[in-house]
Image: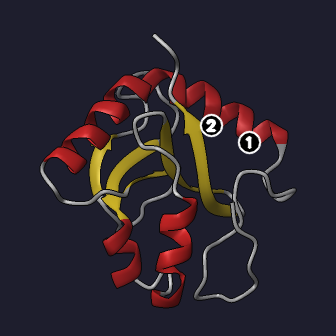
Amino acid sequence: MINNSNENALMDDANSPELNQKLMGYISQDFIRVADQLKEASYQIRKREFSEYPIFAVTNNEIDLGVLLFDSTELTNRYVYKASYMQEFIDRKLIGEESAPLFTENYKNPDEYCCLFVLIGEFSGFVFVPYPED
C-alpha cells in the first residue's frame, strides 16, 4: 500500500520486506479461523454507518484500541481481534490527519478484503487479506 517515513503517515503494508513470510503465514492461518466473523463485523460496521473503513486490530498483546471481538483461543485462533475503524485511528494519531485521504485512496474493497492492523512482535502495520471465496 504505502511506504512513508513520516511518523504521522501510514505505516508500511503487507508487501513491505519488514513483514516476514513466517509471520504472514501465522496471520493467514489464524485469519482463516475468524474470516467469516470478521466479514460479518465489517458488514455491520458499514451497514450501521459507523464507518466505511473498518479496521481489525490483530495482536498478541494487550492494547487499548477498538472493541474486543475474539480473544486468543476463542475460535481456536492464536491472536486477539478487535474491531475499529479509520476515525479511531485518526483520533489516536495512528493515522495522521494529512494521511487520511491517502488511506482511503488505498483502502481495498471491504466486501473482498479485510483490513488488519497487525501488532505482533516487532511488526506493526496494515495488511489487507482477501476473504476466502465461498
The answer to whether residue 17 is left or right of residue 33 is right
| Picture quarter with the N terminus | bottom right
Residue drawn at point x = 54 percent, y = 82 percent: 99
Residue drawn at point x = 76 percent, y = 72 percent: 3
Q: Whole-Å distance between the Cαs marked 1 and 2? A: 6 Å
| Picture quarter with the C terminus | top left
Amino acid marked by disc 1: Leu
* Residue 33 in picture, x, y percent from top left: 47, 22
* Residue 25 in picture, x, y percent from top left: 73, 31
Amino acid marked by disc 2: Ile
Return the residue found at the far top: 134
Q: Any mark on residue 27, and which?
A: 2
* Residue 109 in picture, x, y percent from top left: 47, 44
Residue drawn at point x = 43 percent, y = 60 percent: 62
Residue drawn at point x = 83 percent, y = 47 percent: 20
Judging from the image, what secondary structure is the residue with disc 2 in? helix
Q: Any mark on residue 60, and which?
A: none
Dots 1, 2 in contact, CB < 8 A: yes
Q: Eyeballing the image, is 92 above or below 73?
A: below
How has the structure been colored for display?
Answer: secondary structure
Which residue position holds label 1? 23
Neighbours of disc 2 within 10 Å: few (<14), some (14-19), many (20+): many
Q: Nearer the viewer, residue 64 or 56?
A: 56
Judging from the image, what secondary structure is the residue with disc 1 in? helix
Q: Eyeballing the image, is 39 above or below 82?
A: above
The answer to whether residue 48 is left or right of residue 8 is left
Return the residue found at the far left: 48
